């Protein structure tokens, strides 16, 4: 066969083109700017594009994003990558997809352009413990907990910390030892602090910049509408939400003899903001509900907050935020911060209460004297 240099060159060029086009994500300086829409960008991450709830978690951000560019879906492992400007600032609005695995994969991809990122905020909805410390505490099941502030649907938790709820080893018998008493804490042998078994489960590393960013968002969320930058009022909650909430707390009040509905945290029209000293994400891919699982999540959150901030909280003084992505997002950020060309990027997470992690609990007189509390009584 005659040697045909031109044909060979053409073939190599074709192969190179295929290889280049097949790359998941461009990493050179020029292409990072193309992928993020700037050189000093605020990255807003969300998880659900609407497959779960019907409304994308980035819906309101995307309404504010101007001059939007969307990356070719074939070039990203994220669910959707867009960028544009909000108030003239470059912002990348990226949906990771649901769950810790997708959050970690997408965040890692975005961090390939970490030099171009100013800060990262992960936002989404979550199941909230109905009140700080829960309605009853397994350490004293004789009384409702009247000390903790109730949370409203729409209230916020702003924190850079998360714990993996699934990092646990134990038997079914241990976990359900108190059944049917909902006031019993599930037992286990090894928990989230066993890094040798599960890898990292407590995400407690932070810089002052992370707390500063969190504090800025906390202040902004608490500013009255006239004083906030948008100059708009918070959306009026839908009537089915206020009705659900009012029924929930009336049932809990009726069941416990404590008038929760009188709490200022339930009657305020603004969202209450719980900060990183009181709440954190307790992430799982098990969509659990019930008081014992919530108690477990709160005990892990207390472990997390205590490790992060050298506090002495326990399950009775924190609020659980049941979500999925924080541990994946933070695992990617922590790895990047430890890499030779990486850095610690200021970050935090905002979660908004979309539901409560357990139904109202009731004292069951059939078991009087045994501190039996049943969850989920609806009739
Ligand atoms: C990036 O943007 C932030 C916020 O506007 C600003 O404080 C910071 O100085 C900028 N950094 C660079 C390197 O331009
Ligand atoms: C919108 O984006 C395009 C392309 O990046 C840019 O040329 C244009 O100036 C932008 N317009 C505004 C109003 O930011
Ligand atoms: C609460 O108790 C009152 C008085 O017994 C009753 O009328 C009301 O229906 C109860 N509300 C709920 C939501 O259980
Ligand atoms: C509970 O408090 C609310 C608000 O203050 C009040 O309207 C309601 O009557 C109270 N209920 C009881 C049973 O005291
Ligand atoms: C943590 O707090 C305790 C007091 O509760 C204090 O004695 C100790 O020095 C603190 N440790 C650090 C590292 O700040």
Image: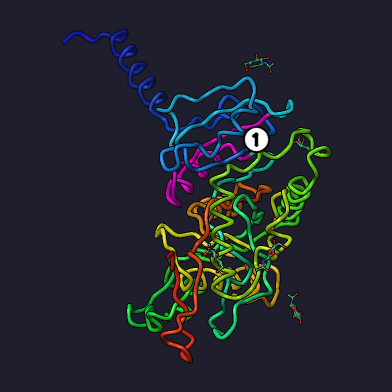
- Please give left or right for residue 333 compared with residue 183 in the image: right
- Please give left or right for residue 369 compared with residue 85 in the image: left
The residue closer to the viewer here, 19 or 170, is: 170
- Please give left or right for residue 190 compared with residue 225 in the image: left
Q: Is residue 314 magenta?
A: no
The residue closer to the viewer here, 371 or 31, is: 371
What is the x, y in percent for residue 334? Answer: 58, 55
Total of numbered circles in the picture? 1
Using the image, determine if residue 282 lies above or below residue 134: above
Residue name at image x 56 percent, y 70 percent: 254
What is the x, y in percent for residue 158? Answer: 66, 54
| The C terminus: image quadrant | bottom left
Colour scheme shown: rainbow
What is the x, y in percent for residue 319? Answer: 61, 65
* The residue stretch that appears in magenta: 90-114
Which picture quadrant has residue 112? Answer: top right
Residue farthest toward the bottom in the current orientation of the protein:
369
Q: Secondary structure at mark 1?
A: helix
Q: Quadrant of ligand 3?
A: bottom right
The residue closer to the viewer here, 125 or 369, is: 369
Residue matched to label 1: 116
Using the image, determine if residue 23 lies above or below residue 134: above
Residue name at image x 59 percent, y 54 percent: 338
């Amino acid at each position: 066969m005659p040697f045909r240099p031109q044909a060979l060159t053409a073939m190599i060029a074709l192969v190179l083109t295929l290889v280049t086009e097949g790359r998941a994500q461009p990493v050179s300086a020029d292409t990072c700017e193309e992928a993020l829409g700037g050189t000093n960008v605020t990255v807003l991450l969300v998880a659900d594009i609407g497959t779960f709830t019907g409304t994308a978690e980035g819906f309101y951000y995307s309404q504010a994003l101007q001059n939007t560019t969307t990356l070719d879906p074939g070039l990203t492992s994220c669910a959707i990558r867009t960028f544009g400007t909000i108030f003239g600032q470059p912002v990348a609005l990226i949906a990771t997809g649901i769950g810790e695995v997708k959050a970690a994969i997408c965040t890692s991809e975005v961090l390939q352009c970490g030099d171009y990122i100013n800060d990262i905020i992960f936002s989404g909805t979550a199941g909230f413990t109905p009140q700080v410390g829960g309605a009853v505490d397994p350490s004293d099941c004789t009384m409702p907990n009247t000390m903790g502030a109730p949370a409203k649907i729409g209230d916020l938790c702003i924190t850079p910390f998360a714990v993996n709820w699934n990092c646990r080893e134990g038997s079914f018998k241990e976990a359900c030892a108190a059944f049917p008493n909902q006031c019993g804490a599930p037992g286990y042998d090894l928990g989230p602090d066993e890094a040798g078994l599960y890898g990292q489960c407590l995400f407690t590393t932070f810089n002052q910049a992370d707390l500063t960013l969190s504090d800025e968002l906390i202040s902004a969320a608490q500013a009255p509408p006239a004083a906030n930058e948008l100059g708009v009022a918070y959306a009026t909650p839908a009537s089915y939400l206020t009705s659900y909430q009012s029924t929930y707390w009336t049932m809990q009040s009726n069941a416990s003899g404590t008038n929760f509905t009188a709490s200022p945290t339930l009657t305020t029209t603004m969202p209450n903001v719980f900060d990183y000293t009181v709440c954190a994400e307790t992430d799982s891919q098990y969509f659990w509900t019930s008081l014992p699982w919530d108690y477990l999540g709160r005990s892990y959150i207390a472990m997390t907050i205590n490790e992060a901030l050298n506090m002495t909280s326990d399950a009775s003084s924190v609020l659980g935020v049941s979500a999925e992505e924080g541990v994946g997002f933070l695992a990617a950020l922590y790895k990047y911060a430890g890499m030779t060309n990486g850095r610690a990027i200021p970050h935090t997470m905002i979660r908004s209460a979309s539901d409560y992690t357990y139904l109202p609990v009731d004292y069951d007189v059939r078991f009087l004297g045994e501190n039996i509390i049943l969850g989920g009584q609806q009739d």
